[in-house]
Amino acid sequence: MKIGIPRALLYFYYGPFWKSFFENLGCEVVVSKTTNKAIVNQGVKNSVPEICVPIKIQVGHFLSLAEKVDFIFIPRMISIRKEQFFCPKFMGLPDMLKHSLKYPEKVLSCDIETFTDNICHYKNYLPLTEKLGVSQKAIKEAAEEAEQKWLNFRKITQLGYPATKAMEYLEQGIRPPKVEFTPGQIRIGLLGYVYNMYDPYISLGIIERLEECNAHVTTFDMFPEVQLKSMTKDMPKVLFWTFTNRLLETGYYFFNSGQVDGVIHLTAFGCGPDSFLGKLFELEAEKTGIPFMTIRVDEHTGENHLVTRVEAFTDMLKRSKAV
Amino acid sequence: MKIAFPYMGTVLVYKKLLQLLGHEVVVPPRPSKRTIDLGVKYSPEFACFPFKVIMGSYIEVCEMGVDAIVTSGGFGPCRAGFYGEIHRRTLHSLGYDVDVIVIDQPLQDKNFMQKVRLLKGQNSWLKVLQAAKLTYQLVHELDKFEKQIFRLMPYEEEPGQTKQAWQQIQTQFDQVFDTTGLKKAKKNAEEILKSIKVREVPEEKKIRIGLVGEIYVVMEPSINMEMEELLCGLGCEVERSQYLSEWIDHNLLPNPFKKSRDQIFVEKGKPYIGLTIGGHAQQTVGAVVDFKDRGFDGVIHLMPFACLPELVSQSIMPKISHEHDIPVLTLAIDEQTGQTNALTRIEAFIDLVKNKKYIKQPA
C-alpha cells in the first residue's frame, strides 16, 4: 500500500515519526517533493483566496500526491498541551481537504490529542487499523519503533540544527556535533512556525541567508518543549494555540535573556494567530529595546526584498555591536 | 463605576443588565466610519474585523471617560478569546487608565468570582438574580419581535414604517425596570406590530433568505451594510442563524430536555465538520442545511475577512450548496466601506434565487 505524506505544515516537526511509522507497517511512503512553483500554483487555484499561504501550499502538496498513492495522511491536530489547541484551520484541515477537493476517499485521518508534543503514542493511531488492514499490535510496535526515530530527530535539532538539516543527518544515521557560537558572529533569534522557516519556497532560504551574513540563528524548536514554559507565567491568559504559545515563550526568552542581538519574526500573509503574536512581540521589543523586524511572506516570490532587508538588519546589528 | 461594553446587536440588553445592577452605564456610540478608522489604526493589520471595530469602540468609550469595560472571553481555538488581552494592552499603551474585565467560563478562570463580585457591587445576590432573570426575559421578547419585524418588512405598504416600528419597540423595552413593566412593554409592542400595514403576498411567491456566519458580522447591522434591511428591501424575508437569546440558551443555560437551535445546527453540520473548531464554523455549516430543510430559498454567508474558522466553512460551502441544492453567497466583511460591489452581488444573487423559485412554478 502506498501512503503519501505532504511535505508541508507539521511535516517539518513530525515528519520523521510519520514516515518511519508507516514504513514499519510495511507501507510504501511517498513524501511529496520540496515545494515548487507548480505545487504552489495548484494550491492557490484550489483553495479559497484569502486563506493563509501554508494551507494553500498544503493543498498543492495534497494534489501533487493524489494520483500517485492510495491514501494521503492528513491527521487532525487537535491538542498537544492541556487546554491548548491548534489553529482552527489545522483542526478543520481533513474536513476542508475532503469536502473541497476531488479526492475525498484518499484522505487518511485520525485525531491527535495528547498532553505533550510527543504524539507518538499508538492509541492516537488506532483508528487507522481498518483502512490500512493491520492489527492493533502492529500499530503499537510500529509506533514505538518510530518514536525512537523521532526522539533522535528532536535531539539533533536541539543541538542547534534546522529541521531540514536534522532530517538529513537522521537519514544518514549521523549524530553531529553541537553547533557552537563563534565570537564575532551576531546572534539572531528567528521566530516562525516550522512550516514557514523550513519550507525553502516560503522562507526563501532565510536561515542560509542569515548564515551567509555571519549570523548564528536560533529557532524555537532548538529548545526542549517545556524549557521555556516559565517565560509566560506572568500573563493572565496565554495564547491558546500551542505552537504560537511556544513562539511567544521563545520570543520572551530572546527579548529578556540577553542571549540574542536581534529578533526576526517570520510570518505568512493572513496568519491569524500571528496577528496577535506579532503585536505582543512589538510591545515587548519596545519595552526591552532589542532590535526587532517582521518579515511577512506570501506566495509571491520576489526574493530581493528579503535579501535587502536581511542584509540591512544584520549590518545594523554588526555596527551597533562594534561601537 | 462608569462601565461600558462592546457594541453588538441590540445593545439595550447589556445596558439593562448593568443598569439594573446600579452601575453608571456608558453605551458606546453605534460603530461609524470614525470607529472603524480608529480601530484599524490601532489594531494589528491582520487581526479579524470584529477585533478592529471593537477596538475603535473601546477607544471611543475611553474618550468618554469610562473606568471599566466588560466583555466576554473564551479559551480558543478562535481568536476572539484573546481579544480582551490585546485590547487591554493596546488601550494602556495609548495611555487610557481603564480596566478590561473579561468574563470567562467559571471553571477555567481562577479570578471568576472576583470579577463577578466587582460587578455585583453592593447588591444582594437576590437582586443580582432578579436582574439576570429580567434581562433574560427581555432578550427573549426582543428577539421574538425582531424575528417578526424582518418577516413583515419586505411586504410593508409604506417604506420605512417597519423600521420605525422596530425602533419604537426597542424604546418600549428600554423603559422596563421590573416584571410589570415588561408585560406592559410587550403589550405595547404587539400593538405597534399590528399597526404595520402589509400587502398580501401568496405563499409561493415569498422568498426567504437565511443569514449565517460569524456572530459579530451577522448580528451587528452597522458593519454588515444593514444586511437584513437590505434584503427586505429586495423583497425577501430574512432570518439569522444567531440571536442573542439563543446564544444564552446554548452557552449559559443549556436545557437537557430541549434541544437548542445551536445543537440542531451542530448535528446537521457534523457530516461536514467533524468537531468544534472554534467560532461558529460548525453551526454555520449546519445552519445552511437547516435553512434548506425548513424551506428557505437561499443563504447569505457572512464572515469577517481572514476569520480562521469561517475560512474552513467557506471552503466547504460549494459542496453543501451543491448537495443540498440551495444557493449560497459568501461575503467577506472588512474595513473597506465601498458597498456598491457587494450590493451588486447581492442583487444578482437574489435575482437568481427568485428565478430559481419562480421557474419551477406554473405561470
Image (spheres, helix red, strand yellow):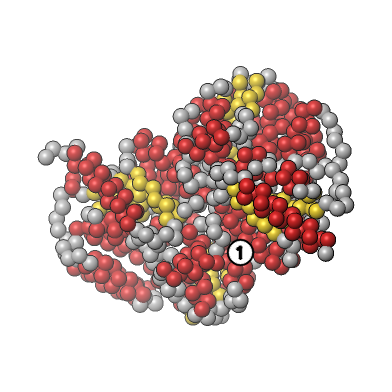
Q: Secondary structure at mark 1?
A: helix
Query: Is B144 positioned to the left or the right of A303 in the image?
Result: left
- The residue that disc 1 covers is B85
Q: Which residue corresponds to the image point at 74% horizontal and 25% vertical from the top-left?
A: A141
Q: Which residue occupies the extreme left position in the image?
A: B363
Q: Which residue corresponds to the image point at 42% horizontal and 52% vertical from the top-left?
A: B332
Kindly tell me whether residue B82 is visible in this rendering.
Answer: yes
Q: Residues within 10 Å of mark 1 (few under 14, many from 20)?
A: many
Residue A61, image quadrant: top right
Q: Position of residue B223 (x, y in %)?
A: 40, 62
Q: Give the letter of the chain under mark 1.
A: B
Type of the residue with mark 1: Glu
Camera-side residue of A53 and A299: A299
Does B329 appear above or below B9? above
Q: Position of residue B313 (x, y in %)?
A: 46, 44
Does A215 appear above or below B68? above
Query: Is B161 positioned to the left or the right of B256 in the image?
Result: left
Does B114 appear above or below A308? below
Q: Which residue corresponds to the image point at 36% horizontal and 34% vertical from the top-left?
A: B323
